[in-house]
Image (cartoon, helix red, strand yellow):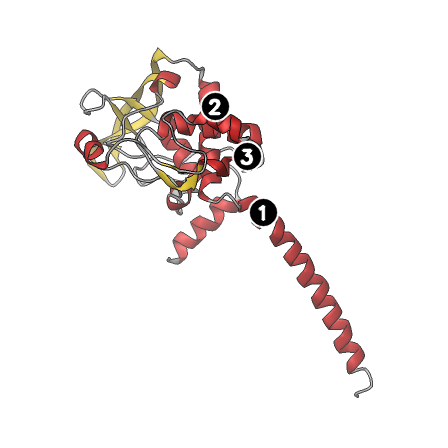
Amino acid sequence: MNFYKKTLAILAIVVPGLAFASEGGHKLDRAPDRSTNMAALQNGAKLFVNYCLNCHNASSMRYNRLRDLGLTEEQIKANLLFTGEKVGEMMTTAMPAKDAKAWFGVVPPDLSVIARAKASSAGTGGDYLYTYLRTFYKDDTRPTGFNNLVVPNVAMPHVLWDLQGVQAAKMVEEKDPHDESKMIHKFVGFEQVTPGKMSKLEFDTAVADLVGYMEWMAEPAQQFRKRLGVWVVLFLTVFALLAWRLNASYWKEVK
């Protein structure tokens, strides 16, 4: 990674709310932090099972790991298992890969660690997913009827359209800053065409919960790792202090 990319990566971590451009040219929004909100993560798990697991696998995650989110096995069975799976099984889709490729042109990727895989100098993987899932817009030229600002000409359909509704992207023409003889289309905002089941605030909150769950799924032990890291740093600090004083005591008679 060159110095420029390293600088962007550091700024994305230390400067709150800072947005960078994604690969599609659209700036990424900062994803709300849901890492310690169990209710939000549980809602995100429900949304994931209902809207993502129909086409995507999460083959590195078992249903029973959701007990770490405060769910009981009975709650998992009653609310998250619909096609006869067992609590100890992996979270996989019933859609054959052959059919998925025929319908979408590509096999939908496994989402187990997608939140980590999409992290870049443009922002965290959570920022990427949070922006991506909220920037689908109506485009009749696409096979699915929708396009996306983060991933132009995306093959994935807008699976959350019933919650968000249908929105159109407003574009304006302006001169290309690199070539004034050319005109480019610049995105200036969305216009709601038909309402969804949720208001904008409710939808953004639901997407934040879903993304929060996907970030948790990518590393379920993250909070334990952070807590353990604090204790390790404290131990090393105390150890270093004791070693320093022992060294001073050992050599105090030596001039």
Q: Residue at x 60, y 53 (%)?
A: 229
Distance of label 3 from label 1 (alpha carbons): 13 Å
Q: Earlier in the sequence, mark 2 or mark 3?
A: 3
In the rendered structure, the answer to whether residue 117 lies left or right of residue 246 reads left
In the rendered structure, the answer to whether residue 157 lies left or right of residue 242 reads left
Residue closest to the far top: 194
Distance of label 1 from label 2 (alpha carbons): 28 Å
Q: Residue at x 47, y 23 (%)?
A: 78
Residue closest to the far right: 253
The nearer-to-camera label among 1 and 2 is 2
The label on residue 78 is 2
Q: Specify the amino acid type for callout 2.
A: Ala
Q: Quadrant of residue 111?
A: top left
Disc 1: which residue: 224
Q: Is residue 208 above or below residue 167?
A: below
Distance of label 2 from label 3 (alpha carbons): 16 Å
